[in-house]
């Protein structure tokens, strides 16, 4: 089965340390520092384990990123149920992007919109004047929805993050940005850690902003496996 093979490949890559930073907060900060020194930005996607105190762990991570002097080049992906930590992150100079059903985001916070959800285009219209991270789905229907959402975001006055690892969608994002007269600093590519690294370097060399999404934490391996299996 294709899904099983995809999950198997993801687990192999996770176990080899290629797709996740590691289980600790220190791992996230270490990889973030490496990427920033290489000219890329970072989206830290920390996933605490089931027995961890998630709020405590996110708070500690925010403090470590700030102490390392990385806050300006990083943003933290937070589940909507921890949206109260957006103010803590802002105080440390670290921006956040919220996943899940957000409603009205806290001041300065961005939102993640998966292209595969039924109301993706409506969400992009609602949040398009702020920061939206549009994530790709699986299958031709999700690709079409991704492009429709891309058109909305590129025509709006916000600062979108276009999260795709499909070279075709990456190219379309660049075309839509040019069509709407967007400068490279008015939007960014968001790409997975350990995937299409050559493409990331090519985009940075071409003057584009590239933010690398770095999974970390005890729950990171399961998160990556679910994504490769098309379940998240």
Image (spheres, helix red, strand yellow):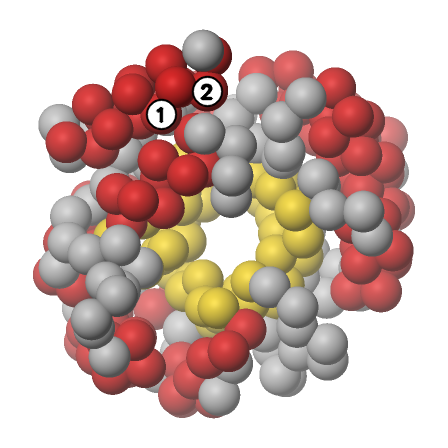
In the rendered image, residue 142, in percent from the top left (x then y), is placed at 73, 30
Badge 1: residue crowd in 10 Å (few <14, some 14–19, many ≥20): some
Query: Disc 1 versus disc 2: distance between alpha carbons?
Result: 6 Å
- Residue at the (57%, 32%) spot, across then down: 164
In the depicted structure, whether residue 95 falls above or below residue 209:
below
Query: What residue is shown with label 1?
Result: 7
Q: In this rendering, would 48 be left or right of 90?
A: left
| Quarter residue 201 falls in | top left
Instruction: Say which of 38 and 79 sits in front.
Output: 79
> In the figure, 6 relative to 21: above or below?
above
Residue 59 position in % (x across, y down): 28, 81
What x and y, as percent, mark residue 122? 87, 55
Q: Is residue 229 left or right of residue 59?
A: right
Question: Which residue corresponds to the image point at 66% horizontal and 68% vertical from the top-left?
Answer: 101
User: Which secondary structure lies at badge 1?
Assistant: helix
**Is 125 placed above or below 190 here?**
below
Q: Which residue is mark 2?
A: 3
| Residues marked 1 and 2 touching at CB (< 8 Å) | yes
For this view, does 72 lie left or right of residue 68? right
């Amino acid at each position: 089965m294709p899904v099983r093979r995809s999950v198997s490949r993801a687990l192999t890559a996770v176990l080899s340390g290629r797709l996740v930073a590691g289980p600790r907060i220190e791992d996230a900060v270490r990889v973030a520092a490496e990427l920033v020194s290489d000219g890329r930005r970072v989206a830290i996607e920390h996933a605490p384990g089931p027995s961890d105190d998630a709020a405590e762990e996110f708070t500690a991570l925010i403090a470590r990123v700030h102490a390392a002097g990385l806050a300006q080049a990083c943003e933290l992906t937070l589940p909507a149920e921890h949206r109260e930590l957006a103010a803590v992150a802002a105080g440390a100079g670290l921006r956040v992007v919220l996943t899940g059903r957000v409603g009205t985001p806290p001041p300065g916070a961005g939102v993640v919109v998966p292209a595969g959800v039924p109301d993706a285009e409506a969400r992009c219209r609602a949040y398009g004047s702020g920061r939206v991270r549009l994530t790709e789905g699986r299958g031709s229907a999700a690709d079409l929805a991704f492009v429709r959402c891309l058109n909305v975001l590129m025509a709006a006055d916000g600062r979108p993050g276009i999260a795709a690892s499909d070279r075709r969608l990456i190219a379309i994002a660049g075309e839509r940005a040019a069509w709407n007269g967007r400068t490279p600093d008015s939007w960014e590519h968001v790409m997975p850690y350990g995937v299409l690294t050559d493409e990331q370097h090519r985009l940075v060399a071409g003057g584009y902003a590239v933010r690398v999404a770095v999974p970390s934490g005890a729950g990171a391996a399961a998160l990556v496996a679910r994504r490769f299996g098309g379940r998240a």
